[in-house]
Image (cartoon, grey):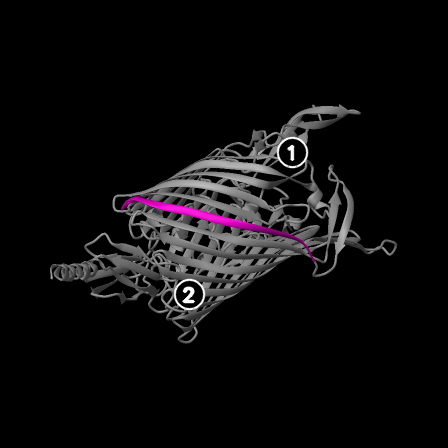
Amino acid sequence: MVIRRSLFLLLCFLFFYAGIAQKVELKGRVVERLSGEPLVSALIKVKGTSIAAVSDANGYYSIQFEKKGIYTVLASYIGYGEESKKIDLRQHQTVDFLLENNLRLDEVLVTSTAPDERVKTLTMGVEKLSAAEIKQMPALMGEVDVLKAIQLLPGVQTASEGGSGFSVRGGSPDQNLILIDNTTVYNASHLMGFFSIFNNDVLSGLDLYKGDIPLRYGGRLSSLLDVRTKSDHPERLSGVGGIGLISSRLTLEGPMGEKTSWLVGGRRSYADLFLKLSSNKALRKSSVYFYDLNAKVTHRFSNKDIVDINGYYGKDNFGAEPGDFQYGNGAFSTSWRHIYSDILSSRISFNISNYDYGLKSKLEGSKATWESSITDYMLRADMTHSINDKWNLTYGFSSILHRFKPGYAKMETSMETEASVEYEVEGSNAFEHGIYLSNEQKISDQLSVKYGARLSAFQNVGKGTVYHYDDDYKETDSTVYKSGEIYNTYVAVEPRLGFVWQLSESSSLKGNYVHNVQFMQLANNSASGSPLDVWFPASPNIKPQVVDMFSVGYFRNLADNMYETSVEIYYKNQKNVIDFAEHANLMLNKNLEGEVRTGKGKAYGAEFMVRKNKGRLTGFVNYTLSRSERTIPEVNHGRTYLSPYDKTHSLNVMANYELSKKISFSAVWVYATGNPTTYPSGRFEIDGEYFPIYSGRNEYRRPDYHRLDLSFTYVPKPDSKKRWRGEWNVSLYNAYGKKNPWTITYDQSEDTGLPYAEMLYLFGVVPTVTYNFKF
């Protein structure tokens, strides 16, 4: 009897305890009210508690409650209204929040992330910017530029004055994967690097991953720049644009029925129109301009099925006697997003990317042309499967066909005695495939981890010719492969591992390890932003480049997330890193692979960041201390030398100050150690002619780089209820006129025979005035 009574009491206790200990879950989505588009990184907070969550890439959120009860839950997203709901949580509930867009033209600063996202998320080495944040930065020649904006972030440095190429943590520009709506961009610059191809008026924001690239993407060592265009669903026709001294732009968007929306944006520079007014005949016949066009159509079959069609086309033209030069990008993508349930969704897309350039010249009695291009065709599928706290899976595949056309030249003559001459460097094809699986797992309230791997394969495909070289890189033989024949394959496993340890509600410690592989590279023509570059693939002669990166970081927010602070330390070990032989010929060279030299490299550094998010004065200060080195047996006599992108010190300061609703100011000051370079260090004489003797590879440095940019914005009627709203912007680029060299060339004095340097400077003080409008 005693045993039976004790057993009954024990069972009652267990049922009672289980009822108390059982958690209840609140989950759902946060979406834009009109379009049903998911709002990424929206903040869901339980009033009167410290409980909060952030929505994922599909707008989903999940919160675990220790106790049942009635709670007031608030959902918010910067630039949108808030929605508050009182929820009775006696059992598991699914509750969606629909937020309304209320962003105005004159709002000063918004962030693209939740206030404490940098502290709580697993990913580190990530910088996120909204379109509004980018617009607050001082303009160059009337345009606020995406790539100039990211060059102000820690660990990111400009490759050259005025150029849009950038280096991330000591890597070269071709180690950065640049995407617009998931489509690869091979040259992101206009006007030789003074503008980027991204029209800020069509963008919703960007993410920059500095090494810890999501597993769904592959093929690059250093970074991923993911740029996204807007997916709003406007109720009526609206537009935004600007009229400047150098260029103008206009973007229109509107509905097409209840389920379809469209967007079209265009830009055009018109410096060439001013050349027509010149008294110089040659200048009057010259043309220097760019144009680009973005277009997008979005159709919502339902809240669970959305199809996007995106297009971009841009072209640059430099025309002068005796010829002209054109280059440009084209990008097309279509994607289908489907939500199977509140835990499973997919995105399937097809993309086409093209970059090409051409030179044409006319001389007396002859005409010459030169063309080069690279084209990609890609199919990919990505799945997101959020089962519970322990299983937040992403998995999928991608397959790319690369078509490389390194160069074609033709010389035609009007003389009957001379025939036309054609020369073509044989093109090549390659497949690049990848499958991946990753998981984010919450171990405890303090510790979360992520892990996964990507399996990549790269295949060279005929028709093609493989040249064989001896130990001195002289061609000895060749093998021809027929069309469609796979004659070389590389397979690589790319693992990832990361963690976040929540030290407190406002601070955390993070760490990760990544292993990245890159199967294609760039033969750089110069370091000054020239588009005359040739992409070429890994092959039997050139192994894929590999990097192992270890990083650790401390993140802390202060004063209710008013201030963000962080310190990140990284170390990169590279294998098969490429460089080129002395005096290498990279243009129209069928033996380009014979000019390549490979070895190892390393890069390490520390990045410090302080950001102020609230108040009239906002901005950031960041500092990077870094080193980047290479060791290649055939270069610099096998001695270790500095990478061309090594910059010991880099300091960026940005400030925005809102004096009133009508007036705001912004300023940017940048400083960086000069790039390593090779100088002539002496000379020798042969038959009365002097020849320079060069120093070791990258033994010297260019002058240190620094610059101040200022911007003033005036909004005449900030509280106007009219549809048309406008503002004036006046900017000064390089306000104190620092002479930062674009290129440095070396010549020999005819009098003394001594070598000397000639520096070409692009910019002094550049003032611009722009009228921006919205309706």
Q: In the image, is residue 241 above or below residue 711?
A: below
Amino acid bearing label 1: Pro
Chief secondary structure of the magenta portion: strand
Q: Quadrant of the C terminus?
A: bottom left
C-alpha distance separating marks 2 and 1: 50 Å
SS category of the residue bearing label 1: loop
SS category of the residue bearing label 2: strand
Q: Residues within 10 Å of mark 2 (few under 14, many from 20)?
A: some
Q: Position of residue 419 (x, y in %)?
A: 84, 55
Q: Nearer the viewer, residue 352 or 569?
A: 569
Q: Point out the residue furthest to the bottom here.
A: 257
Is residue 335 visible to us here? yes
The magenta region covers 486-507
Give the residue at mark 1: 633
**Location of residue 360 by image quarter:** bottom right
Q: Position of residue 468 (x, y in %)?
A: 74, 45
Disc on the earlier residue, 2 or 1: 2
Q: Is label 2 in contact with label 1 (beta carbons under 8 Å)?
A: no
496 in magenta: yes
Give the residue at mark 2: 345
Amino acid bearing label 2: Ser
